[in-house]
Image (cartoon, grey):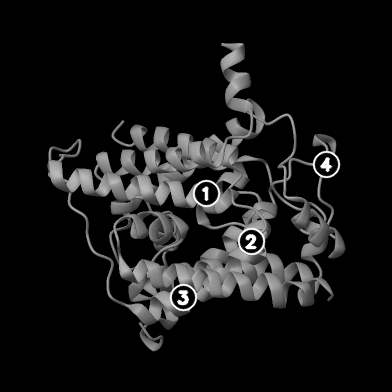
């Protein structure tokens, strides 16, 4: 058993990860649902009573109760993955990315003591949240995720994985949009935000 | 009880998101800088296997656990919404290094600060609901 856990705890090869995501999508479809996480935002707003103000939230959110339970599961899965199945090393990035980020003044952890390599701790903390840079990265960033995914009608799971694998043209257009925004942010806007 | 199976699949998803490192802010930077094949490999394999799965289900007429024939709804042909909404989301994805699935998983890692990002995403969803009729779709 110990050796099984050690085996799973290594960082997974991308082909294994991709296959496992396809398996998650299959399980949801086989269980009568579909793979798309951003609909949970709409359900959560509806539960909060947004339906009394805007028609978009006037729908039977209970039809999404399974998705909220799925999301709860993914939080638990994150807890299991980061404790019992934690990798012995932080995320191993390419040398080019480490060089680029270091030049931007972002610390890339090289040992577990410095971090797991999942979140840049010098940017994402409550102290930074009190600055303009932090508000833009966390509050505006989060806002754009909610606004954009609901406008596009899906996120990475709903469009890039579910939609593309079902050969949906609107999903391909959405993924092109994801990259227009992502490339513009990473290469043009992000360095400016960091300089604030 | 009815929902327990979705909880299990969710737990699997959280573990997969963690071990794949798809929830890493650094990996998303690497992806948008085209400096590693890692993220493209993950998404590519998921899409290819997913396409195979869609075809197999359609050809075999597989039934889901409710006993109904599995049917796939087409995405609505709202191309303006796809490109504009997609671009907005892309900006946010590159800032926070997380899309909706990973946001939840990161909370499970104990990153409390991510709750601020999720609350902001709900605010963004609310704003979309308010402006929906005025936006191109």
* Residue A58: x %, y % from top left: 31, 68
Task: Using the numbered discs, state the Cα–Cα distance from disc 1 to disc 4 in whole angstroms.
Answer: 23 Å
Q: Nearer the viewer, residue B89 or B57?
A: B57
- Disc 2 sits on a residue from what chain? B
Badge 2: residue crowd in 10 Å (few <14, some 14–19, many ≥20): some
Residue A154's place in the image compared with B51, above or below, is below
Q: Is the residue at mark 4 from the same chain as the one at mark 3?
A: no
User: Residue tagged by mark 4?
Assistant: A110
Helix, strand or loop under label 2: loop
Label placed on residue B41: 1
In the rendered image, is residue A33 in sight?
Answer: no
* Residue A181: x %, y % from top left: 57, 74
Helix, strand or loop under label 3: helix
Residue B103's place in the image compared with A45, above or below, is above
Label placed on residue B85: 3
Badge 4: residue crowd in 10 Å (few <14, some 14–19, many ≥20): some
User: Residue tagged by mark 2?
Assistant: B34
- Disc 3 sits on a residue from what chain? B
* Residue A194: x %, y % from top left: 80, 71
Helix, strand or loop under label 1: helix
Rendered-image quadrant of the N terminus of chain A:
top right
Q: Is the residue at mark 1 from the same chain as the one at mark 4?
A: no
Task: Using the numbered discs, state the Cα–Cα distance from disc 1 to disc 3 in whole angstroms.
Answer: 25 Å
Q: Residue at x 71, y 77 (%)?
A: A189
Label 2 or label 3, whichever comes before in sequence order? 2
In the rendered image, is residue B55 in sight?
Answer: yes
Helix, strand or loop under label 4: loop
- Disc 4 sits on a residue from what chain? A
């Amino acid at each position: 058993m110990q050796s099984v856990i050690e085996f799973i705890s290594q960082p997974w090869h991308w082909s294994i990860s991709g296959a496992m995501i396809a398996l998650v999508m299959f399980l949801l479809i086989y269980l009568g649902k579909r793979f798309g996480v951003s609909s949970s935002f709409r359900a959560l707003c509806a539960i909060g009573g947004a339906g009394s103000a805007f028609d978009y939230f006037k729908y039977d959110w209970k039809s999404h109760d399974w998705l909220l339970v799925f999301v709860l599961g993914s939080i638990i899965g994150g807890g299991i993955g980061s404790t019992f199945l934690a990798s012995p090393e932080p995320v191993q990035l390419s040398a080019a990315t480490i060089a680029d980020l270091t030049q931007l003044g972002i610390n890339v952890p090289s040992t577990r003591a410095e971090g797991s390599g999942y979140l840049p701790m010098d940017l994402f903390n409550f102290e930074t949240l009190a600055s303009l840079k932090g508000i833009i990265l966390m509050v505006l960033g989060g806002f754009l995720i909610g606004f954009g995914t609901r406008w596009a009608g899906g996120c990475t799971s709903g469009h890039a994985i579910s939609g593309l694998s079902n050969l949906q043209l609107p999903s391909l257009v959405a993924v092109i949009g994801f990259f227009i925004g992502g490339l513009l942010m990473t290469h043009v806007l992000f360095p400016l935000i960091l300089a604030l | 009880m009815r929902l327990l199976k979705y909880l299990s699949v969710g737990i699997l998803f959280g573990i997969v998101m963690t071990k794949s490192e798809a929830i890493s802010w650094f990996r998303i930077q690497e992806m948008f800088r085209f400096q590693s094949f890692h993220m493209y490999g993950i998404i590519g394999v998921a899409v290819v296997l997913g396409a195979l799965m869609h075809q197999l289900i359609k050809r075999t007429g597989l039934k889901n656990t409710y006993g109904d024939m599995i049917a796939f709804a087409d995405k609505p042909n709202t191309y303006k919404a796809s490109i504009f909404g997609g671009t907005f989301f892309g900006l946010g994805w590159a800032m926070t290094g997380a899309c909706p699935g990973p946001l939840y998983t990161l909370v499970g890692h104990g990153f409390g600060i991510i709750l601020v990002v999720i609350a902001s995403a709900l605010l963004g969803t609310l704003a979309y609901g308010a402006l929906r009729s005025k936006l191109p779709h």
